[in-house]
Image (cartoon, helix red, strand yellow):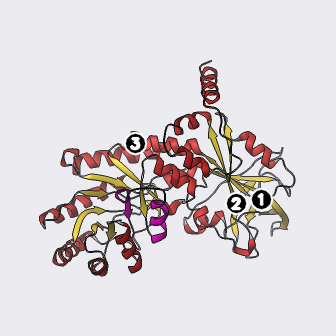
Amino acid sequence: PTCDIVNQMGAIHMVDTITSDPDNDQPFFVVDVADVIYKIKLWKLKLPRIKPFYAVKCNSIPAVLELMAGLGLGFDCASKAEIDSVCALGVSTDRIIYANPCKTKSFIKHAAATGVDLMTFDNKVELHKVKELFPSARLVLRIRVDDSGSVCQLGLKFGCEVSDAQSLLLLAKELGLNIVGVSFHVGSNSRNPSSFSKAIEEARFVFDQGLELGFNMELLDIGGGYPGDKGFQTLFDEIAATINASLDLHFPEEEGVRVISEPGRFFVSSAFTLYTTVIAKREVVLADDSVKAMYYLNDGVYGSFNCTVFDHAKPVPFALHCREGSLRPCSLWGPTCDSMDMIEEDAMLPELHVGDWVVFENMGAYTLCASSNFNGFQVPDVKYALTYASIMYLKKFPFWDRLVCHFGDQYEDVDTAFVEMSCALFQQEAIA
């Protein structure tokens, strides 16, 4: 990794330096650290009652985890490795929820050994496993809710029916286990704010069932599903308003119920931009005698674009350097020898040549985390862009020195007085 210090104009100089080198034909990400900071501040502003537990699976590169930990977020972990990654940052175990309803037995033992005692479940078999391996665990019952308004529906795999919740609570009571709350997930990348209100209402119903059985119900986990792409603000505002109103109705603050959530893409999606190059080009004649270009890029479905398969994403390409002429239909392919490695069958781009750069925004969620080295192609390098204002903000925190270590050897710290002067100059220019 490398890092550049940039002004409010962003990473333009960094990108220009890299892409103007004719010998450089490797893909790379640029991470706008300020964008992540903004999202964290926005969450606290719009959803002040809800403690975010970052979904590690979404993007687990070290700098992201260090930033989330340093700025006080909790963590949603689904495996032994994810728990270990978070604990290695010095995060206390009370900031971790083991949010996988169906856990490997050895992982439950590991959670017990490390003190990660808050975990979800949604079935009877899981209760018996916990009774055997970690009877003192604090359990959160995950219910299935309507996720039809989401891009990735998770109810097919996880969550008990609300009508079955009481039988699970009764079994937990019989086994002497400790149920502390209810969780749900409206599906990844939800487009329907009303899904949250209905889910919170159903969670209240199950919550009351637990209280009637004598459980100390103290936690509500409203899961993930929040938008994170550029242009997210309107939808997020609607979701936040819906959640706040529903919480006030069903879980008023004076009850003292702790509310957490499991956002992932919200924090990282728009912060990551992927730069790829055209490594080859073919032109095919279609049945109507028109010509369609096939562009082969240096990253593909086995790399960052695994998101098109696993996350149902539809990345939108644009040419870094626009040429005169109209947009033309084309298809985009990855570099591997597999014909399945197709990024986009019907894209619209200006005519491109080998060596031209194609850019994809909103590539921070479910991309790097599932990338592979199939066919010998390497995962893209990650480069960080830090604004002067971000540096001044982050330097106030004790984790700054650890964060800088993730930015690579090319990062050079700057004099604090210089940064302060630069920020003042930019503020003056903005006012002018």
Name the element at disc 1. Answer: loop
Identify the amino acid type marked 1.
Answer: Gln
Residue at numbered disc 2: 380
State the image coordinates of residue 80 (x, y, percent, origin top left).
45, 71
Q: Residue 44 carries which label?
A: 3
Q: Give the distance between the C-alpha atoms of the residues marked 2 and 3, in whole angstroms.
A: 32 Å
Image point (72%, 63%), residue name = 299
Residue at numbered disc 1: 26
Image point (26%, 78%), residue name = 131
Contact between labelled residues 2 and 1, with CB atoms less than 8 Å apart: yes
State the image coordinates of residue 120 (x, y, percent, origin top left).
33, 68
Image vertical order of residue 256 relative to residue 105, above or below = above
Q: Which of marks 2 and 3 is nearer the N terminus?
A: 3
> Which residues lie in the magenta part?
80-103
Identify the amino acid type marked 2.
Answer: Pro
Q: Give the distance between the C-alpha atoms of the residues marked 3 and 1, in whole angstroms.
A: 37 Å
